[in-house]
């Protein structure tokens, strides 16, 4: 029998999706499952994007330019201008989601064995992208006690080696919802300039900031033109995950020129997705005002409910639509599977993402779970009741 590659065996399973078979079996048994495991918004996709797809009238759906349709890239420069980021169309490569953009950047900027520092917990697929490209993730721990704030600069400097090529942050953060401040970005700027590192900035949740907090971008900072690579996506912003359109942006000409080779090798990003994404740029600000109001209310429901559960703790994040909560459990992987396989409360249960998959350090996240508060408030309230009842009877509960 032919063998599987080492890379294939090392590729981590998604903590967000790996329990899907158990959820499907629970549904077959008639159990209602509240899906809090995945960041799939239930907010209606912006109508402008839907209209653009309905009105698409070309006779042939052609390949686009490998960097993306020029009219879309020009439109994106208008969007970023509104957010204080000045770029040109030739500094953008459109990709099949931010995921492909990150793969392009890792492949362009790093060789197998090179190291990228990422505060953990972090978006689980960063581990997968690193395996795919042969890059080594060097995690530094952030703590639930302070809401997963940026670790001190000394913690970064402890792990910087001659193989270190980049630091990566997601801002606002997935999975923690933490929103990095201007001061924290300044710390990372100092590191990047001192050690000549790339700064990989995942900013797909830019619009999701609460409590009067403002989003700050590395692309707004002076002196980092050669260092910063920005990743973005329409998935969450316009509630359009399935169009699979994102981008990488950098003012570094060498990075763009070489990343284009990878873009050409995969031919082009999705044409129909770009049509929808280009139209979505004109989405009125009122859309985001209502979305922010809805997610803020949802966050408050989840955070307040968890913190009322004996032995549980949940920070109050200021961004994205996720929380990482600490629960009185022995093993989050076992607990999340048990919820689907062996538990229901009045015919209902909840699907969560075990936080172990959002860490690179073995053993971390064993008593933590990630929740995506992407359901309507009434469903969130019911799911929190299920969670509280589950913790009362879970065999692996820690007192």
Image (spheres, helix red, strand yellow):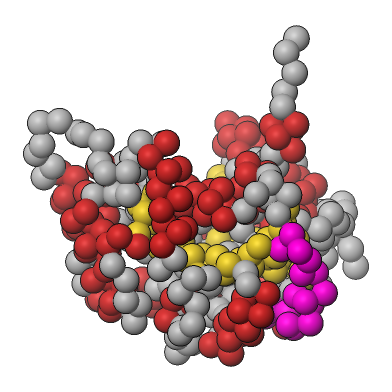
Which residue of the protein is positioned furthest toward the front in this rendering? Answer: 254
In the image, what residue occupies the spot 60% across and 39% down?
20
The answer to whether 196 appears left or right of 141 in the picture is left
Q: Position of residue 125 (x, y in %)?
A: 61, 50
Up/down of 389 relative to 34, above or below: below
Depth order, front residue of 374/209: 209
Depth order, front residue of 295/12: 12
In the image, what residue occupies the spot 23% across and 49% down?
69
Which residue of the protein is positioned furthest toward the top in this rendering? Answer: 1
In the image, what residue occupies the spot 69% across and 32% down?
8
Any magenta on residue 96?
no
Residue 250 shows in the view? no
Depth order, front residue of 163/45: 163
Depth order, front residue of 260/19: 260
Up/down of 38 relative to 57, above or below: below
The answer to whether 232 appears left or right of 191 in the picture is left
In the image, what residue occupies the spot 80% across and 69% down?
159
Q: Position of residue 26 (x, y in %)?
A: 62, 37
For the N terminus, the image quarter is: top right
For the C terminus, the image quarter is: bottom right
Residue 332 shows in the view? yes
Magenta part of the protein: which range?
Answer: 148-164
Up/down of 64 relative to 223, above or below: above
Q: Position of residue 335 (x, y in %)?
A: 77, 51
- State the count of labels: 0
The answer to whether 212 appears left or right of 145 in the picture is left
């Amino acid at each position: 029998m032919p063998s599987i590659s080492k890379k294939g065996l090392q590729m981590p399973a998604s903590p967000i999706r790996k329990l899907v078979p158990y959820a499907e079996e629970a549904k077959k048994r008639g159990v209602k499952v509240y899906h809090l495991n995945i960041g799939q918004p239930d907010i209606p996709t912006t109508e402008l994007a839907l209209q653009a797809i309905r009105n698409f009238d070309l006779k042939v759906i052609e390949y686009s330019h490998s960097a993306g349709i020029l009219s879309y890239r020009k439109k994106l420069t208008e969007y970023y201008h509104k957010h204080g980021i000045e770029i040109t169309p030739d500094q953008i490569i459109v990709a099949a989601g931010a995921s492909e953009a990150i793969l392009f950047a890792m492949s362009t900027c790093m060789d197998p064995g090179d190291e990228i520092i990422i505060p953990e917990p972090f978006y689980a697929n960063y581990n997968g992208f690193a395996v795919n490209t042969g890059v080594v993730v060097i995690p530094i721990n952030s703590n639930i006690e302070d809401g997963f704030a940026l670790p001190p600069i000394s913690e970064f400097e402890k792990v910087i080696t001659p193989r270190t090529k980049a630091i990566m942050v997601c801002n606002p953060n997935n999975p923690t919802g933490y929103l990095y401040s201007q001061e924290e970005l300044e710390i990372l700027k100092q590191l990047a300039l001192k050690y000549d590192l790339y700064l990989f900035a995942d900013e797909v949740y830019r619009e999701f900031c609460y409590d009067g907090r403002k989003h700050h971008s590395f692309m707004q900072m002076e002196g980092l033109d050669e260092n910063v690579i920005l990743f973005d996506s329409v998935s969450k912003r316009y509630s359009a995950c399935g169009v699979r359109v994102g981008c990488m942006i950098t003012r570094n000409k060498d990075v763009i020129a070489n990343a284009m080779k990878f873009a050409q090798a995969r031919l082009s990003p999705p044409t129909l997705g770009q049509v929808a994404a280009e139209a979505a740029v004109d989405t009125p600000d009122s859309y985001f005002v209502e979305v922010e109001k809805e997610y803020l209310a949802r966050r408050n429901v989840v955070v307040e409910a968890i913190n009322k559960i004996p032995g549980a703790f949940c920070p109050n994040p200021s961004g994205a639509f996720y929380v990482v909560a600490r629960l009185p459990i022995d093993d989050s992987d076992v607990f999340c599977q048990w919820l689907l396989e062996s538990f229901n409360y009045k015919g209902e249960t909840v699907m969560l993402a075990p936080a172990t998959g959002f860490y690179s350090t073995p053993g971390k996240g064993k008593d933590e779970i990630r929740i995506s508060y992407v359901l309507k408030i009434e469903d969130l309230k019911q799911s929190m009741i299920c969670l509280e009842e589950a913790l009362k009877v879970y065999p692996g509960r820690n007192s």
